[in-house]
Image (cartoon, rainbow, N blue to C red):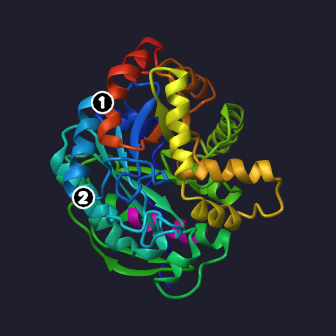
């Protein structure tokens, strides 16, 4: 067997210096980074029939990205889906593949980072490395890769075989990203032999424009996932119920990274539900929930093992799913939304990847009413 050679290791300070020198948006001076999440799938992040102009067409997708780009958002982050999640809406059942989606948006935008979200078991690392470099060149160094280990069993079974045991997924992911990083950074040929991959005389040119390689994100929150993220990534994508849980998770994640001689950015996610007054906001929220796809919410909450929980807990989880994939929804007047963002920033969250019921209609409102307040609060330059 050929000996495995680890990808080149930079100190965390060298990594950050290289990213800032390259002008990578996710490493700019804004205290609270902003990204658009989920605008590559039908219904976006909200499992509801509530009225919206949002549609899964390329023209509409470009419009969302261009508005976000003009507002100074740092990222466009997609959801990786190959099948819907069921329910009345077949939630996310129509979806765009994320590397080609990122390549198209790279041509349609000027400054915003374009991410692919990739289930690592569905794509060979040599293919992922080459696709990612191509998008990084198309975007002139604005590409990022969000890695998932594949959590949706029915989706993974589409690709043949069964889903790996949880920790084995991260061992697989560790070999996968090691190979990808080596293809991005090493000249000449690469050999690799491990538990899951055997690579012989692999070659890949050109290298990424972004140095040392594209920004990496992962949402691992288990012990194996946190260790993987702390070792390999730039940002950990976390879920939390409230700012207190966000603080606890961020502290734990950073402690693991610091033990490895690194630091790690923390990203959260959630939809924004905001109107000028509390009364208007409550009416807007109620319309989303009243027309929610409770069938898919029940199926997903059952899959998360909540059958034995209290009714109130289960209902809250189902509402969170309808309002945005179980993320932390930012609900209230513009002033209240910014207060919540300040709380999250104080808790150690560096950025929020957000969605809207109607991205095209609500993003201008966000720019007019919420962004100025974020600047006043010191969250944005």
Inspect this view and state whether residue 186 appears: no
Q: Residue furthest top?
A: 376
Sequence-wise first label, 1 or 2: 2
Q: Residue at x 52, y 83 (%)?
A: 157
The magenta stretch is 171-180
Q: Residue furthest bottom?
A: 161
How dense is the environment of label 2, judged by Cα within 10 Å: few (below 14), some, or many (20 and up)?
few
Circle 1 residue: 364
Circle 2 residue: 57
In magenta stretch: residue 308: no
Q: Foreground residue, 257 or 131? A: 131
Q: Residue at x 59, y 71 (%)?
A: 169
| Residue 66 percent across, percent down from the top left | 22, 40
Looking at the rendered image, the quarter that the C terminus falls into is: top left
Q: CA distance from mark 1 to mark 2?
A: 20 Å
| Residue 9 percent across, percent down from the top left | 47, 51
Relative to 140, 176 lies left or right: right
Tag count: 2
Which quadrant holds residue 375?
A: top left
Which mark, residue 170?
none
Whether label 1 touches label 2, CB < 8 Å: no
Q: Reply above or below: 10 against 176.
A: above
Inspect this view and state whether residue 166 appears: yes
Q: Reply above or below: 314 against 269.
A: below
């Amino acid at each position: 067997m050929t000996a495995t050679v680890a990808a080149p290791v930079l100190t965390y300070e060298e990594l950050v210096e290289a990213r800032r020198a390259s002008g990578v948006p996710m490493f700019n001076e804004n205290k609270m980074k902003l990204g658009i999440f989920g605008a590559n799938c039908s219904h976006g992040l909200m499992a509801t029939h509530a009225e919206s102009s949002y549609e899964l067409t390329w023209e509409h997708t470009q419009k969302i990205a261009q508005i976000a780009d003009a507002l100074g958002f740092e990222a466009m982050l997609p959801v990786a889906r190959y099948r819907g999640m069921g329910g009345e809406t077949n939630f996310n059942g129509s979806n765009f593949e994320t590397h080609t989606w990122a390549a198209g948006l790279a041509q349609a935008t000027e400054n915003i980072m374009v991410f692919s979200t990739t289930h690592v078991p569905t794509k060979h690392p040599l293919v992922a490395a080459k696709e990612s470099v191509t998008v990084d060149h198309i975007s002139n160094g604005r590409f990022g890769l969000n890695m998932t280990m594949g959590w949706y069993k029915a989706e993974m079974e589409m690709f043949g075989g069964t889903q790996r045991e949880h920790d084995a997924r991260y061992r697989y992911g560790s070999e996968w990203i090691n190979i990808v990083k080596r293809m991005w950074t090493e000249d000449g040929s690469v050999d690799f032999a491990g538990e899951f991959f055997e690579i012989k005389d692999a070659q890949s040119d050109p290298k990424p424009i972004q140095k040392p390689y594209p920004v990496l994100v992962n949402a691992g929150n288990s012990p194996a996932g946190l260790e993987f993220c702390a070792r390999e990534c730039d940002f950990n994508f976390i879920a939390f119920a409230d700012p207190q849980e966000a603080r606890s998770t961020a502290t734990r994640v950073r402690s693991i990274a610091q033990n490895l001689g690194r630091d790690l950015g923390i990203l959260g996610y959630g939809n924004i539900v905001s109107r000028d007054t509390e009364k208007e906001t409550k009416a807007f929220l109620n319309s989303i929930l009243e027309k929610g796809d409770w069938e898919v919410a029940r199926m997903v909450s059952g899959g998360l093992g909540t059958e034995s929980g209290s009714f109130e807990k289960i209902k809250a989880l189902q509402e969170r799913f309808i309002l945005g994939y179980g993320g932390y929804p930012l609900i209230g007047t513009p002033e209240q939304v910014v207060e919540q963002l300040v709380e999250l920033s104080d808790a150690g969250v560096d950025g929020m990847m957000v969605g809207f019921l109607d991205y095209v209609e609500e993003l201008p409102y966000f720019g007019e009413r919420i962004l100025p307040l974020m600047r006043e609060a010191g969250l944005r330059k």
